[in-house]
Image (cartoon, rainbow, N blue to C red):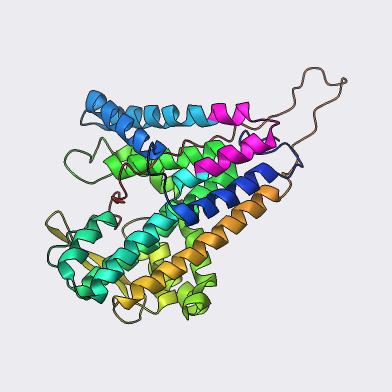
Amino acid sequence: MTCEGRAPDGARDWALAGGVAAGVALDALIGDPRRAHPVAAFGRAAAGLEARMYADGRLRGSLYAGACVLGATLPAAAAHRLTRGRPLLRAAAVTATVWAVTGARSLRHEAERAAVTLDTNDLAVAREVLPGLCSRDPAHLGPKDLARAVVESVAENTSDAAVAPLVWAAVAGLPGLAAYRAVNTLDAMVGYRSPRYERFGWAAARLDDVANWAPARLTAALAAACAPAVGGSPRASLRAVRRDGGHHPSPNAGHPEAAFAGALGLRLGGASSYQGVTEYRPELGDGRAPEPRDIRRAARLSRAVTVSAAALAALAALAPNIPGPASPGPASPGLASPHGLPGWGLLPVGRPSRRPGRTRGGVR
């Protein structure tokens, strides 16, 4: 059975594997494209379409999300077809897409900026940096509250900005990369529980929940496996995930956050303010409260998880696909051989800004 985004039956997809590895390396070396960022272009187009389509209802929001995702997916599907049988071009296309849709270096860079300002106890600048990482109100946060906000954001966005795109690359190749980023970007734009988006953003939020279900849990597993890199215990990390991961109001965010809390020996969660409203999150982990020095430990753990996810995605691309059922011979003229549906995802579109605005009760 051939998947539209992957190699034919029994083949090892060297172009996909090499493109994933090269794209992650490119992001680590130079970060996001500084000009003509395709994710920013998608964000502008989606915002323009929202202005024309907005209505306070789920149906209109579903049509809007579908149109945006389809518009982002079609170019990726076209690129996939144009590079079929041209492994060097396919690898280059995957490299460019992975580079554009992942944000691991940018995430660590923003975390480092926050750590530097807290090192010098410059709370005013630290509060200015925080909106680049999460959407909570920074005005009255002290050093430990700021540190907790940054560590939580690093944990969740390691899943959203690094692991999830690579999972979808392994599952559905170039179209899967594109599709995931489109869904995640729409979630960041309209997936809020606010008067404007409660109904209109419902479809985008639900799509994002589905797209991130497996990546969030893989992120938690990788964080536990990589815990020794930051002096932590895999067992403590897994214990925190099992005990606390499901208590978070988001169906996904609690798993990577609990895993990071256990791996770092911290306690995350608690009171947070969003747009002037204080919300109380369940505590994750049973360690001490985060301190500014823990931000760099979280960033190191994020890097280790990203490298591990890239290696797994590349290995998955190299694993031979399982052949589908054989086509019937001439003796069965009335039967057609079954084919799988195309394994498209959606397109690499994402963050019109680097602010990961959380959806439907998530944290960010």
Q: Would residue 89 be counted in the magenta stretch?
A: yes
Q: Is residue 266 something one can see in this rendering? A: yes
Is 93 positioned to the left or the right of 358 in the image?
Answer: right
Which quadrant of the view contains residue 15? top right
> Number of callouts in the render?
0
* Residue displayed at 29% across by 78% down: 291
In the picture shown, does residue 186 fall above or below 314?
above
Where does the image place residue 23, in percent across and percent down from the top left? 54, 48
* Residue displayed at 57% across by 41% down: 94
Main secondary structure found in the magenta portion: helix
Q: Quadrant of the N terminus?
A: top right
Q: Would residue 6 be counted in the magenta stretch?
A: no
Is 76 positioned to the left or the right of 188 in the image?
Answer: right
Q: Among all residues in the image, which is located at the extreme right? A: 331
Q: Which residues are magenta?
A: 77-97
Where does the image place residue 278, in percent across and percent down from the top left? 15, 61
Which quadrant of the view contains residue 47? top left
Which quadrant of the view contains residue 203? top left
* Residue displayed at 30% across by 70% down: 115
Q: Among all residues in the image, which is located at the extreme top? A: 333
Where does the image place residue 195, in percent across and percent down from the top left? 16, 41
* Residue displayed at 86% across by 24% down: 329
Q: Is residue 252 something one can see in this rendering? A: no
Q: Quadrant of the C terminus?
A: bottom left
In the picture shown, does residue 71 fall above or below 173?
above
Q: In this orientation, which residue lies closer to the viewer: 63 or 176?
A: 176
Q: In this orientation, which residue lies closer to the viewer: 273 or 339?
A: 273
